Image: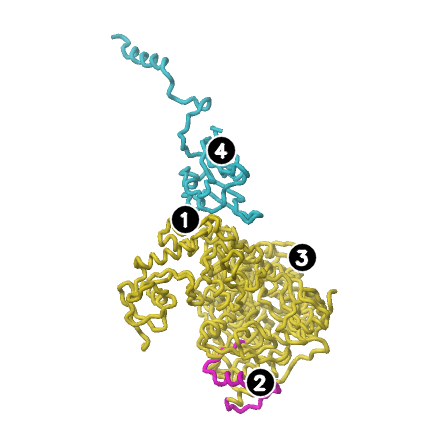
Chain colours: A cyan, B yellow
Amino acid sequence: MLFNDLRKGLAVTIKYLFTHPVTCQYPDERLDLPHRARWLHKLETYEDSGKIKCIDCGLCERICPSKCIKITPKENEDHTKNAAEYDIDLGRCLFCGLCVEVCPELALSMTDVYELAEYDRERFVYTKEQLLNVKTKKG
Amino acid sequence: MADAVKIKINGKEYEAEKSESILQVARRNGVYIPAICYSDRFGAIGACRICAVEIVGMKKPMLSCAMKVKDGMEIFTDSEKVQEFRKKIVYEWDKFHPLQCGVCDKSGECDLQDINYELNITENPSEEAADPLTVPDRSIHYEWRIIHHDANLCIQCRRCVTICDRVVNFGILALVKKDWGGREIDTKDGKPLECEFCGQCVSICPTGAMSSKLFKYKARPWELAKVRTTCQFCASGCQMDLNIKDNAILRVTSEDNTPNRANLCNLGRFNYSVVSRKNLIEHPTSNGKKVSLEKAIKEAVDILKSCKSDEIAAISGARETVEEQLTLKLFVENALSSKNLDSFASTHIGKLYRVLPEGIEPFNAVSDMEECDVIFAFGGDVANEMPRLDWQITRNVKLLKQSKLITAYWRDAKIDTLGSVALRYMPGEEVEFLNSLFGALANSLGVKSSVKGSLEIPEDGVKLLSEAKKVALIVGEEALERPYGEEVAKALANILMLLGEKVKLYASSKYNNSYGVLFSGVADGFDTFGRRKEQSFSLYELPNLVKEGKVKSVLLLNADLFTVYSDEDARAILDGASVIYIDSYLTQTAEHARVVIPSAPFSMVNGHYVNIEGRFNSVAKALEGDFKPASEILLEISNQYGYSIPTGVIKDAISKASFELEGVNKEFNNVESKGFEFGDGLKGVLVYSKFRSGIFSSFGDGASIAMNEPVVEVNPEDAEENGLENGGYATVEGLSALKLKVKVDEKMPKGVISVPLWFYGYNGYNLSGSLNNLFSAKLLKGE
């Protein structure tokens, strides 16, 4: 038959004109992430006092396979210990989540914030303030 | 071996000696038995009971640390019965032990963690059964300054109590009954801890109960890199590990297998912060202005070139490495062709080693003191001058109970608490005392000599000395630093010769490399390898030579003038001559010297220190810094001066590392009975503090927290006469005046006061004059 091939092709095209699209229209829309997705870290605080949970036990620093966590401890006035500085170099981080798993104080979690591209390598180093104020998509 | 026995451990046969404990035999053969309270540093306590083993034929597990081996003993170290026994003990320790390993500084090197892990303890029936309301209210001592004690973490193994009592001989810690019904480690009198702050308790604590405040929350133990080096504070040569993180020293530790048995004093363990940036000379200066290193070196060369060779003098501070000393020696003698070279070591040990009798071993290993049945400590407070010697004496007398102690000093000191035959003289009578002792001793040994003194020597002391098989003669730095120190040295040499081969000599020195100075031949009267040569120049003459204009330029290597001269003399040298100062620390000399060149401090330089034993201990570079070692600076100065120093010679000398120092005196010296003429007032003595070694040590946290200002020690009667109170202030008048805090001490003889040296801003030599440690004093209340 004349134009048989063309007809076949157009049939497929026309069929898809009436079906739902499978691609995600990023950045106008975003996919739903799995419940346990591992993206940007967040430092947790206590709900009542607002104090940082991290006690600088150093386990995350120790377990990190890419050695991208650096904590500086401080002694508070009540002789307790907290992290004065907490830096994660996301340029090296491989988002394995071992740091979250090892944390004895549940002070570190991973969020669904995955848009982490930067123009500058230095900006991959997230400080304590940035990690405390992570805004998750879910709110 | 008559005492040899054979024992079986876990089915394998081992040879042992009767005097050994099971634990010792097991450890020697690499069989593991856990032990918490046992330490090689003091032996068995028998408090923790974790080292229990099963012995065939005995019902209960027995403590392997306390049990001596017997022939045919059959031992099981790891049977089920033993495991159960150990578990029960650990349950008790774990009961209410706070689960704060996350913030505990000990976590990672904690013996309690290790034993729990080893016994695989995951639950604690003992705690589960307990009523949570019975958690005892134990105390946490935040007020103990350098030491932090948290009784909640304590498992009451009594290690700290034992080490404080039997190794340090201070004995301030004890298990004390508390209100909550149990016992806690506390000071015996319940007051805040006031002690030597040596931190031995911190080093021995198996848990985090005793910890260092200076290290608190600084880092986790596994983050620290350890660099083995030698202490920079005295000539003991204690081996220690600098714990480094992020290019900073965070703490200092030591290991049991070091010659010093992991023992460190306050300065060694806690005063590491002297090398922090704020205490160091940052950049070279010339006439007080900041210049580049090249310019400073050029200026130094110009100064040296403008002077004739006999117008230049060089002084070493006896604190730099041997390599640096040898470079200085070669530069001064070959390039400058000057004979004016001396070192701070000439103020004390130089005098003694110049008159050393023939056949006397010049250097002896400190641990060999254990062979001596009599220890004779003369002329200084050993505990303040050299804690390592003090602790070795303590080990001999208190722990091993194999030596008798004789002390000769003008006051009762710490070592006298060990129980001693106390020979006493007044300050200023050292020569007279030694001559009298010599006379009495010669008489008792049947040696004919004309040397005699007028003092009465107690017979028991003479008897002990003359009947001794081996005598350890400990010479205090203080006695040799008297203005008549050379006479003291000669009188000592007579006694050394009299005792002959049975004497072991230990001469204490606060300067870490004063023995290296003898090796490198920087001290007056010594050539390289410690060979003897003619005396040519003494630092005692320097102030006058500068005042007379005979010396126009002075090269100082680590020699802070204010450590041995009075302010007046030091300023006279600094103003009267062009001073080139190579050092690391921001001392007063650095503020006033014409040219200042910063050199790499301890921990930023590789090299060697020679200690009291004549051993070459290596000093390792642990920190990165942009400082050049003093040897490189001297090489550069020498190159520009027109002489290239043969560095191969220095390397050869270091690799040889042995002294050719031998005693020459063959006959008894005739010693003039010199003394010191005190005026009508009190007898003032400058003494060493155990919290200072060189003025720069004031800059460190360990020393300054332990003792931030000098105290004048006064007899209670003298204090009352002058209206002084303990803790109040007094003006001490000698040649000039110093306002000092008063400590009333019963142990001070009446009519004598002591002022400690080397506190920054309080120059004791202002009272007595340079290179002298006696003065006639007046005490005035307050202003």
Chain to which mark 2 belongs: B
Q: Looking at the figure, which quarter contains the C terminus of chain B?
A: bottom right
| Residue B569 figure quarter | bottom right
Between marks 3 and 2, how big is the CA–CA gap? 56 Å
Q: Which residue matches tag 1? A: B128
In terms of sequence position, does the residue under pointer 1 or pointer 2 come before the other?
Answer: 1
The residue to which callout 3 is attached is: B288
- Tell me the residue that label 4 is attached to: A118
Whole-angstrom CA distance, mark 4 to mark 3, is 49 Å
Under mark 2, the amino acid is: Ile
Comes first in the chain, label 3 or label 1: 1
Which of the pair A114/B172 is nearer the observer?
A: B172
Q: Which residues are magenta?
A: B445-474
Report if the CB atoms under discs 4 and 2 are less than 8 Å apart: no
Estimate the x, y position of residue B134 in percent, counting from the top left: 48, 51
**For the residues tagged 1 and 2, is the chain the same?**
yes
Q: Assess disc 3: are there few (<14), some (14-19) or many (≥20) residues with their C-alpha within 10 Å of its C-alpha.
A: some
